[in-house]
Image: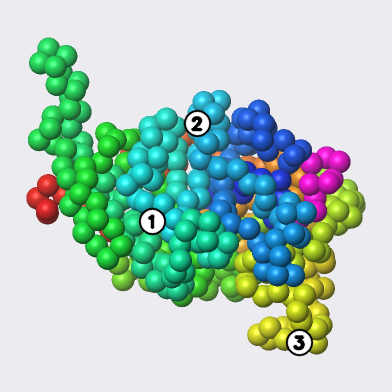
Amino acid sequence: MTKEIHINAFEKNCVGHIAHGLWRHPENQRHRYTDLNYWTELAQLLEKGKFDALFLADVVGIYDVYRQSRDTAVREAVQIPVNDPLMLISAMAYVTKHLAFAVTFSTTYEHPYGHARRMSTLDHLTKGRIAWNVVTSHLPSAHKNFGIKKILEHDERYDLADEYLEVCYKLWEGSWEDNAVIRDIENNIYTDPSKVHEINHSGKYFEVPGPHLCEPSPQRTPVIYQAGMSERGREFAAKHAETVFLGGTDVETLKFFVDDIRKRAKKYGRNPDHIKMFAGICVIVGKTHDEAMEKLNSFQKYWSLEGHLAHYGGGTGYDLSKYSSNDYIGSISVGEIINNMSKLDGKWFKLSVGTPKKVADEMQYLVEEAGIDGFNLVQYVSPGTFVDFIELVVPELQKRGLYRVDYEEGTYREKLFGKGNYRLPDDHIAARYRNISSNV
């Protein structure tokens, strides 16, 4: 029998995330992103649908490459305005019991000492339902606003991220022993000082003596996500990640990334099965094929080419307004790129349009043939995309034995890797910092 498929909702604390222009669609409620009720209602909906997690992307800069200006991004709400995703999690956790929360946070702009405390706090408040999507960030506008004069080269940003995680691992895994907190009322001892340790980290980028400010949380280290598909990004994933967000829309590309990362993981002494692989998917589903096509055509009416060109410019550094349609970027003409951007056709992620059976068939095929473990579901209209998936596709997947009927108890890590696995496995690089008192 095919393995159980994991599903995350892929979201962002903004108006326009991926489907630019669709904020104007009459069924879209994304304008409510500043209303906490929007997020608590969404979390409850996703838990009703037995989703694994709400995966919150983030960006702390503006897409200002296209037309050498931020105007298009600002005018069309291309990931601006955008609010802080961390602020949403406690409220959503309060109204749910099982749904996990994967939050994006960059290693480039803020110090690991403070970030480690934030994540420990969230792990406590969610009772072990927190994950961290590690990104290194590349937008020049963000660097400028954080006062960073020198932008590190791509690979060096990963070097910094390696050390950032090392600091966090030392704080989370080694600074406090498991039995440091004793709550001895009679002797007025809340914590045994002999079991709280400095980490004395001294590296190229950070000096952190410690100790950690927080007592051990249910998972200690949050579940680690990673999404970079460059050579250096895949190496980073193989070393650190427990969940990887893969690029690619077809079996061949996805399978290449799956096999490559799992092969690299062995080099670090890791069990490749300790890494879950997720692909992005866009689903437009109807009770009939015609109904699904009506929805697609409705979405296409509001699709913004300018918005997608602004997003493309920010992501790639190419301002397509400077090129003629006959110019080439790599092996593809600018005309082709613009034509592709003008259509709602799954250019970023796999697009599945049709009946519940067709969507489930395509999802099952990708899992079986590419070796992935699950999907990050992108929305077109909110909450309609998720409502349709839950009402139409989830029952079809459950009927095939591919999707949970109910949640198991436990932390997010346990829901991914099995009961009792609430801590990072011993083969993860972070495990070496667990006996830090004997190593410093």
Tell me where the magenta segment starts and ends, as one range.
19-28
Does label 1 or label 3 sit earlier along the sequence?
Answer: 1
Q: Residue furthest top?
A: 186
The image's mark for residue 327 is: 3
Q: Is residue 339 above or below residue 186?
A: below
Picture coordinates of residue 152, whole percent (x, y): 43, 70
Check contact, mark 1 vs mark 2: CB within 8 A.
no
Q: Mark 1 Cα within 10 Å, few/some/many (few <14, many 20+)?
A: some
Taking the spot 35% from the left edge, 50% from the top edge, the residue there is: 112
Picture coordinates of residue 275, whole percent (x, y): 42, 58
The image's mark for residue 274 is: 1
Give the structural element (helix, strand or loop) at label 3: loop
Taking the spot 81% from the left edge, 82% from the top edge, the residue there is: 325
Instruction: Please indicate whether residue 1 sits to the left or right of residue 19 in the image.
Output: left
User: Disc 3 or disc 2, which is closer to the eye?
Assistant: 3
Instruction: Please indicate whether residue 341 sits to the left or right of residue 390 in the image.
Output: right
Q: What type is the residue that disc 1 sits on?
A: His
User: Disc 1 or disc 3, which is closer to the eye?
Assistant: 3
Q: What type is the residue that disc 3 sits on?
A: Asp
Q: Considering depth in this image, is 372 or 299 the residue closer to the camera? A: 299
Does label 3 or label 2 sit earlier along the sequence?
Answer: 2
Q: Mark 2 Cα within 10 Å, few/some/many (few <14, many 20+)?
A: some
Report the Cα–Cα distance between label 1 and label 2. 28 Å
Q: Is residue 439 above or below residue 390?
A: below
Instruction: Please indicate whether residue 88 sits to the left or right of residue 274 in the image.
Output: right
Report the Cα–Cα distance between label 3 and label 2. 49 Å
The image's mark for residue 90 is: 2
Check contact, mark 1 vs mark 3: CB within 8 A.
no
Q: Is residue 19 above or below residue 317?
A: above
The answer to if 27 sits in the magenta stretch is yes
Give the structural element (helix, strand or loop) at label 2: helix
Q: Quadrant of residue 211?
A: top left
